[in-house]
Image: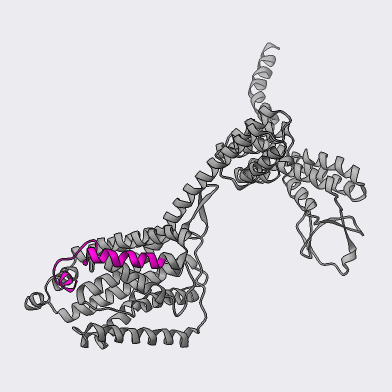
Amino acid sequence: MFSLFKQIGVMLLICMPLMAQAAEPQPYKEDQASSAVATSELYELSQQLIDAGYREKQALVETLVEINDPQTLKFLQVMVNGDLYYRKDDRVIVINEDDAITIFFTGESITLENKRDIKKISVNNKLRTLLRGGIARLQIFSNNLELRKQAATNLLKSADDLDEATLQLAVEKEKNADVQEILSLVQGIRWLEADDEKQRLAGVELLSGSLYPDVRGALANYVRAAEADERSTEVAAAKKALDKIEAMLTANAVVENLYFGLALGAVLLLAAIGLAITFGVMGVINMAHGEMIMLGAYTTYMVQQLMPEHMGVSLVVSIPAAFLISGLVGIAIERGVIRHLYGRPLETLLATFGISLILQQAVRSIFGPLNRDVGTPDWMAGTFMINPALELTYNRLYIIIFSLLVLAVLALILKRTLFGLQMRAVTMNRPMASSMGIRTGWVDALTFGLGSGIAGIAGVALSQLTNVGPNMGQAYIIDSFMVVVFGGVGNLWGTLVGAMSLGVMNKLLEPWAGAVVAKILMLVFIILFIQKRPRGLFALKGRAADMG
């Protein structure tokens, strides 16, 4: 008998862990079950909404907010937008958005023979306020960080959507510093309407230094109300807070203009590098340089037409394509026209001006006179936010980086390759370079092609900032010459400094003087500067210096 009990005991010891494991709750199945119960409860309450009056709907909405179901938030949003309907014959809840009818719980699209087959679940202003509060509550306690941040930002516009207790709970529970800061600002806006003066002043102090537009609006309204009630202490505190915000906004505007100026300088750098090389080596005033930029931009447009499903790849492909096409056209111009006009700068200027008109008309004949829109890849679109008052675009940042990369590659070519050595030799002393066996004619042609190719790359960058048209190159030719003269003819570092300086100067002057007057002031500045330093910021020794 003892042996029998012993065997039974051993079996129980073996089976107990297995039984415990079997009895252990399965989280996934439990979540599924609770989700199914929540969806069932949401369905039952939605059916009750059909026949409920407005007071009953308020009670039902308060119950809906407590349901832990992913569809609850969507249900309340559809309802507050006035898009929640039901089908009369079978009481199925549907969404009616822009005459597109879908069943709420399944997402199935349906077609109605008569629009009167469905009826709206109506809401009034009081119910709409209750719905907005419920939506704000669900969003602010969501597990999704972006949803919480969006909800907190929306509360800045309508701080009364959440009651004080719920708002305080949200502030205490929030782990993300950015969302918590926004919620604190919402509290500050609410405190501006408090009965206690100390709490109102605490609200002003909390809002001081915030760059959100809604905060500035709340403080401005508070100042008007305080002035009307002759609360001088509060008026002074609020105005001090507004002055601090205005000073920060001014600083942010300067930073934004500096960024735009650097982006413009990057474009000018790409446009002027080729001109600096061409002018420095051959002394040719190329008025068709802007059309090389135009050809690069149209090449980008054509590559995108050939690769419509691969926007990002097409832009990368456009860079070598634009370089080759503009470079080959440049070589053709040099071999066909310019090489016959060396030593006659005025005739070269007139000839290249005529070529620019021919190229513009050719583009009009092929593509038409209207501007063409070049798409921006997803990785270049959008902005990155420094603070609520300062958002900088990605496309300009990429163009700044790209222009510096082009400059670095070009510097390596000039310093580390045989072609670069020959080109520098021709720049310094053409007769001596020729006597050493350098084919100066081909150096001129390849140099002109290199400069034109880089101008084509500038067109690729410009296509991401503006529309592509036959006249787009003319807008940058004068600025390019100004950069070259200001920086120093044929000097890459001078071109970099000149382009960035003029770009930043232009953008800083524009808000104060306007675009046209800013250009005139820049031109006057360069004229005066050249009077003092005829060879520019960084004078190049040799033949380029003799041309000055």
* Towards the viewer: 495 or 51: 495
Q: What residue is rendered at 59% in x and 39% in y?
A: 239
- Magenta part of the protein: which range? 519-548
Q: Position of residue 174 (x, y in %)?
A: 61, 34
Quadrant where the N terminus lies? top right
Task: List the single residue furthest toward the top.
Answer: 2
Quadrant where the C terminus lies? bottom left
Q: Is residue 144 left or right of residue 124?
A: left
Q: Position of residue 326 (x, y in %)?
A: 34, 77
Q: Is residue 85 left or right of residue 184?
A: right
Residue 407 in view, yes or no:
yes
- Location of residue 62 (image quadrant): top right
Against 334, residue 97 (above or below) is above
Q: Position of residue 51 (x, y in %)?
A: 93, 49
Is residue 238 inside the magenta stretch?
Answer: no
Q: Position of residue 70 (x, y in %)?
A: 72, 45
* Towards the viewer: 132 or 42: 132
Against 195, residue 122 (above or below) is below
